[in-house]
Image: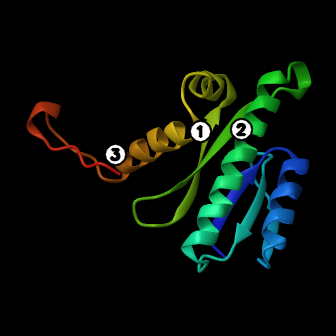
Amino acid sequence: MSNEYIFFDADLRDRFVAFVAARGIASELRADAMDGLIVALADDLADEIEDAIEDHYTTLMEVQRDLAEAADGDQALALMAVAITLPDGQPGTVRIPARHARRLFAHFSVEEVHELVAAIAQSVANPVTGPLCQRDYPTP
């Protein structure tokens, strides 16, 4: 299993697991070192199933964002996560301090945040040296 999804709320994780289980997809659950909850799925799913899973995950991330924004004091999250696919095809998770993530999600859609994080990961994995005006920037 290599498609991984991270949650910071057990109820949202359980909703996700129920969603994939209803489609006959097995999942593995484990804790993340940063107090997250990881759900791992097989990496050989059909494209249309992966698309449906990604859409559902995006919806749950919006709910997770709303929960994080509404929380305060001891309930406030210190981190938020964005699931990405690295340039070599490996799934990954980028952890963003919640104070920055809240600002990102206040101005960008979930898809736009994912695109931004993917572009940063692409740039880190494949750095371009020299002035920007003299280099073609690879798009993710």
Quarter of the view holding residue 89: bottom left
Mark 2 residue crowding within 10 angstroms, few (<14) / some (14–19) / many (20+) = some
Q: In the rendering, which numbered label is found on residue 123?
A: 3
Cα distance between the residues tagged 2 and 3: 26 Å
Q: Is residue 135 above or below residue 87?
A: above
Cα distance between the residues tagged 1 and 2: 7 Å
Q: What is the x, y in percent for residue 61?
A: 71, 43
Amino acid on which disc 1 is placed: Val
Q: What is the x, y in percent for residue 1?
A: 67, 76
Residue lying at 91% horizontally and 49% vertically, measured from the top left: 11
Q: Which residue is mark 2?
A: 62
Q: Is residue 36 left or right of residue 109?
A: right
Q: In the rendering, which numbered label is found on residue 110?
A: 1
Label 1 vs 3, first from the N-terminus: 1
Closer to the eye: label 1 or 3: 1
Residue lying at 57% horizontally and 26% vertically, measured from the top left: 104
